[in-house]
Amino acid sequence: MRETMTSSPEDSCEATGKTVQQYIDETPVWSDGTKTAATPLTPMQWRIWWLAAAGKFFEGLVVFMTGVALPLLAQEFGLGPTSHGIVGAASLFGILIGATALGGLSDYFGRKPIFILEMAIFTAFLVAVSFSPNFPVLVFCLFGLGVALGCDYPTAHLVISECMPSSARGKFVLGAFGFQAVGALAGAGIGFLILYENPTVGAWRWMYATAIIPAVIVTLARLTITESAHWLFARGKYDEAERETLRLLSRVPPYPQRVALDVDEELAEMAQAERPGGYRELFSEKNRRATILTSVPWFLQDLSTYGIGIFTPTILAAAVGQQKSHATSVSDIVLNDMLAAKGAAVIDMLLIVGIVAAALLADRFGRIKLQIFGFIGCAVGLFLASLSVSFADPTRLYLTFAGFMVFSFMTNLGPNAQTYLIAGEVFPTKVRGKGAGFAASFAKLGAVLTAFLFPILLADIGVRWLLYILVVASLIGAVVTWATRIETAGVNLEEIGK
């Protein structure tokens, strides 16, 4: 007879009720009392994870593909250095606005409605950007894409973290976040293939259009997920919370067969009357340290990551000098762009390796240690790249690529991954969306400044001094992380803020 799995006797307390997280964290045992090694994920948990990962993929695809599209955009619309900066900053400024303006709405209306809305907005603007007739419309559409992606920063994190076991939360949040790097690599690859097949100035439109059908599919699929039982419980919707917890944990053989949440009557009345906390609460004495920890290091990290990511082709051209310094025809522009896309793809592969390492190590070694170590590693990589300016080829080529590859690996092992992870964990449920959204918005302020100023500073002070500035920013990030540290590895989300 086939042996079945049941709940652990010491964990089974349906008569008195459990919390949402206790149900999610519960480790089944075989009928002879042998415990399983981990809590197996249900099909619904996997569906939520994949749909959240898709949003991060689209972000990496669109934002980093802009770096490949920039030379073509400059040719079609006659862009100068300032206009270059505006194009690079448009989607990032949209992320800044979207993370706060829309991401915080998940605390009021629920995680699921905003999770669907953001992807619908993204799809609509993706169509619009592919048909942009002029520069102002293009900038507006890129901004709209950014608004949708900004909303995804806190919302995607929350739909994952609030449905996953505490022991593996970091692994799954960062696993989904890693698809940003996959998207960046795909963006460079798609850009190269489209240029190869269609070597014209208008090829950039096809680059963005490739994501339209996948975005529609993801939007429709998000309609089928569960609402966060954590959010429902925090809003006093206990019957709905029990129903969604049971749906989330639906498996074969079925366990649990029913869900009975532990509800304190006095606390229930308070929850019914209490509204979600406002942004002012993020700066209260209880949450101020968490706000600084999630916002300032992320801001400093984005100065480097987005600047390097978007303008890698430009920096490689200035530092390595393999491309034609003065493109005199469309064919020259396309050739230069194809070479830059290939170089960016090689470097982007290290982003994937870094995020895989982060996902494997975050729950084992903790978020804070990896973030500090990563910041220091980023500084080393950027400093190594800055040394290339003093050498001739091939030494210059080796130093540039070595520095950028070290940076790409260390940023995704450390600050690029851990800042995102921490921001969705350190705040109480009722302000978790706002806290994560504010941190993402503050971080994207650094990204916007970098995207706008990079082409200007690159022309005024050169590659070396620009990289020196980013080295200092990385070291400051390590110091701030240590000074405001709050470790969240393995912490039950329901205990945050208590």
Image (cartoon, helix red, strand yellow):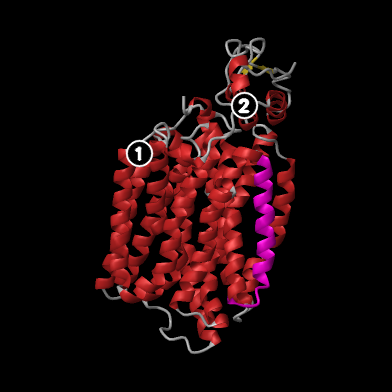
Of labels 2 and 1, earlier in sequence is: 2
Q: Which mark is residue 49?
A: none
Which residue: 59% across, 28% down? 274
Q: Position of residue 146 (x, y in %)?
A: 57, 59
Quarter that holds the N terminus = top right
Q: Position of residue 111 (x, y in %)?
A: 64, 40
| Magenta segment boundaries in residue numbering | 112-135
- Kind of residue sitting beneath label 1: Lys
Q: Secondary structure at mark 1?
A: helix
* The quadrant where residue 43 appears: top right
Disc 1 marks which residue?
369
Q: Is residue 124 magenta?
A: yes
Q: Horizontal placement of 205 versus 300: left or right? A: right
Which residue: 59% across, 14% down? 11
Q: Residues within 10 Å of mark 2 (few under 14, many from 20)?
A: few
Which residue: 31% across, 46% down? 478
- Kind of residue sitting beneath label 2: Ala
Decide: marks 2, 1 in contact (CB < 8 A)? no
Q: Residues within 10 Å of mark 1 (few under 14, many from 20)?
A: some
